[in-house]
Image (spheres, rainbow, N blue to C red):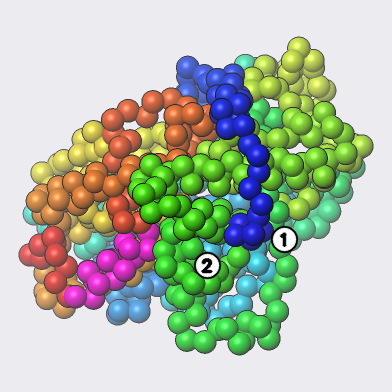
């Protein structure tokens, strides 16, 4: 996959762009995100039930902790670990799942694994001494790493599982946060962290008749192994041997699950509205001797920085990870390096980006022809859009699954399933009778923060976060918000905004928060807050950058990257990152927190 040696293709760019637009247009819907159903509080709320961990009754908490964190995924774990390292040990993580893990607690569907290399994706590998077993770790290993972090840093001691925050309010008089939950808790915290993330609220497609189906159904984030047989470790789903199964959706989840369903179901129907781009994954075990040689002190930080440098057009002289993510970046760098001096400007670089993308996508589509035996099926599995219009997928068994005689691709030509009946699904006027429907329809991403989090936040003088962000996200570093003292966000936007490897954003956020909290405690300060001036200056700096670039471009096929093809409104212009790119941001934030000045923050 070395883009530096790939031969340029003779591509009719105008014809290709016309094809992209045609495929986009047939998928545009006026309802945008409203096409999906909100499950919480509805008659479909049973799809949210936890099938993995029994609910345990407990007494409500009414105590005080130094730091409370909402969300027990990577964000909460890395922040809790960094706080523990600087001496803040009474950290309480509030998590709606039955254990740590966040999206990796819920996603236990067959074949689930990370699509960014384990060495840079799994957090705190060096601190926990864990060697990933393979280049792309499977879900059980990632969940185990989350649990390992929780144990090593004592984060289980104060954790509240199967608990959802219902209200979060700053007490001006007491100068602390009051946290209320659905378990009757009402406790306080000096500091609060929010890491609810975008991938934890399941959504279902708003297909007419969805309640009429008399067979079995579930969402992939609540996989029903009692029905299918098997387990997250990969045991065969033997209870499907006589079952007709339908899976709706062909995104990253379905790409991983379909090969396993294909092996065991009597009949598998894959209902596709838009195909994913499927590049080579080339997963392989990690050699212990090789790992021992490279795992010298600071190894994971070096790998993180190298991956980001390769992704962000940094100054990397080597590519440690060498995967599909860095492949496109290498291609773009090579094209830019070959530009004449008078074309090394934003327009010229954008053209180089586009040329590289065209070539890459042509290769991905050509790969389909070499793998899928039936030409018509293969043609319908080809992705006609830019690679970064949707989350790129990498797999070496998904396309092959369509060669199995028991697997049928039901391509809806962008229209989706028409309706669901008592016996099955209707697409293209044809009813497909099935025993089980699996919804691989993903999570809420484009909905408002308050809806996804499940609560609003009340800051100083009762200011609501939804009001402060009514015209878009406004922060400093994506972490601090004026009017909300002692509150910290852990997420990528308005920071590095590195979407290809979100955990890098989270680990740096955790480091930054720990440094700020330690400084406040050492100084005897009861409040820390970004000034209005510093926040405004940061937002102004962000707006000097290139904006959202290719991701979410108006000519992309609809998906969660581009708000389902709908105009996201003026607030979306603030959903950007540091103008000089992720690598520069990480260097900047490291210097900012280590200077000890914490420019822009007030400690009182």
Q: Residue at x 33, y 35 (%)?
A: 572
Q: Is residue 590 magenta?
A: yes
Q: Is residue 472 among the parts visible in the rendering?
A: yes
- Cα–Cα gap, marks 1 and 2: 17 Å
Q: Residue at x 63, y 48 (%)?
A: 8
How busy is the neighbourhood of tag 1: few (under 14 within 10 Å), some, or many (20 plus)? few
Q: Is residue 236 magenta?
A: no
458 sits left or right of 408 in the view: left
Q: Residue at x 46, y 69 (%)?
A: 316
Q: Is residue 248 among the parts visible in the rendering?
A: no
SS majority, magenta: helix
Q: Earlier in the sequence, mark 1 or mark 2?
A: 2
Q: Residue at x 48, y 38 (%)?
A: 561
In contact (CB < 8 Å): disc 1 and disc 2: no
The N terminus is located in which quarter? Answer: bottom right
Residue span colored magenta: 582-595
- Secondary element under disc 2, as helix, strand or loop, is helix
493 sits left or right of 560 in the view: left
| Rendered position, 244 above or below 283 | above
Residue 347 placement (x, y as % from top left)? 38, 42
Closest to the observer: 138 or 204? Answer: 138
Residue 584: quadrant of the picture? bottom left
| Rendered position, 105 above or below 226 | below
The C terminus is located in which quarter? Answer: bottom left
- Secondary element under disc 1, as helix, strand or loop, is loop
How busy is the neighbourhood of tag 2: few (under 14 within 10 Å), some, or many (20 plus)? many
Residue 118 placement (x, y as % from top left)? 59, 66
Residue placed under numbered mark 2 in the picture: 120
| Rendered position, 190 above or below 302 | above
263 sits left or right of 482 in the view: right
Residue 273 placement (x, y as % from top left)? 65, 27
Residue placed under numbered mark 1 in the picture: 282
């Amino acid at each position: 996959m070395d883009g530096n040696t790939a031969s340029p293709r003779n591509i009719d760019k105008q014809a290709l762009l016309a094809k992209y637009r045609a495929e986009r247009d047939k998928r545009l819907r006026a309802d945008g995100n409203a096409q999906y159903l909100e499950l919480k509080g509805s008659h479909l709320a049973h799809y949210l039930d936890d099938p993995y961990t029994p609910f345990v009754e407990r007494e409500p908490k009414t105590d005080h902790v130094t730091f409370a964190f909402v969300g027990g995924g990577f964000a909460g774990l890395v922040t809790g670990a960094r706080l523990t390292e600087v001496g803040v040990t009474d950290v309480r993580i509030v998590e709606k799942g039955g254990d740590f893990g966040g999206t990796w607690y819920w996603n236990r569907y067959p074949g689930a694994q990370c699509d960014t290399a384990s060495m840079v994706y799994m957090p705190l590998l060096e601190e926990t001494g864990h060697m990933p077993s393979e280049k792309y770790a499977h879900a059980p290993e990632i969940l185990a790493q989350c649990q390992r972090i929780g144990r090593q840093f004592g984060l289980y001691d104060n954790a509240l599982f199967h608990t959802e925050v219902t209200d979060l309010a700053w007490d001006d008089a007491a100068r602390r946060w009051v946290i209320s939950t659905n378990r009757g808790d009402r406790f306080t915290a000096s500091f609060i962290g929010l890491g609810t993330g975008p991938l934890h609220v399941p959504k279902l497609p708003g297909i007419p008749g969805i309640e009429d189906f008399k067979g079995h159904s579930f969402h992939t984030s609540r996989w029903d192994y009692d029905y299918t047989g098997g387990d997250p470790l990969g045991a065969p789903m033997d209870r499907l041997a006589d079952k007709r199964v339908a899976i709706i959706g062909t995104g990253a989840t379905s790409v991983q699950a379909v090969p396993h369903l294909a092996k065991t179901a009597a009949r598998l129907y894959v209902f596709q509205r838009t195909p994913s781009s499927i590049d080579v994954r080339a997963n392989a075990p990690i050699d212990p001797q090789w790992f021992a040689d490279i795992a010298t002190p600071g190894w994971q930080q070096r790998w993180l920085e190298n991956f980001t440098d390769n992704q962000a057009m940094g100054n990397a002289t080597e590519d440690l990870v060498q995967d599909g993510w860095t492949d496109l970046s290498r291609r773009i760098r090579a094209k830019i390096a070959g530009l004449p001096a008078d074309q090394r400007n934003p327009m010229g670089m954008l053209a180089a980006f586009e040329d590289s993308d065209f070539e890459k996508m042509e290769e991905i589509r050509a790969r389909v022809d070499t793998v899928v035996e039936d030409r018509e099926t293969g043609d319908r599995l080809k992705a006609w859009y830019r690679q970064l219009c949707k989350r790129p997928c990498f797999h070496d068994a998904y396309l092959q699954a369509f060669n199995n005689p028991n697997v049928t691709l039901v391509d809806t030509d962008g229209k989706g399933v028409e309706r669901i009946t008592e016996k099955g699904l209707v697409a293209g006027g044809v009813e497909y009778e099935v025993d089980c429907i699996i919804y691989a329809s993903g999570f809420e991403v484009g909905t408002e923060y308050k809806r996804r989090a499940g609560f609003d936040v009340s800051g100083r003088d009762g200011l609501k976060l939804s009001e402060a962000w009514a015209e878009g996200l406004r922060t400093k570093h994506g972490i601090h918000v004026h009017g909300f003292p002692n509150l910290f966000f852990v997420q990528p936007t308005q920071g590095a905004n590195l979407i290809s490897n979100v955990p890098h954003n989270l680990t740096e956020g955790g480091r930054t928060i720990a440094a700020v909290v330690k400084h406040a405690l050492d100084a005897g300060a009861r409040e820390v807050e970004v000034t209005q001036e510093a926040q405004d200056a940061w937002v102004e700096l962000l707006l000097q950058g290139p904006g959202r670039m290719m991701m979410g471009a108006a000519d992309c096929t609809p998906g969660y990257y581009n708000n389902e093809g709908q105009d996201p409104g003026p607030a979306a212009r603030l959903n950007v990152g540091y103008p000089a790119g992720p690598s520069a941001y990480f260097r900047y934030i490291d210097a900012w927190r280590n200077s000890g000045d914490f420019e822009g923050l007030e400690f009182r």
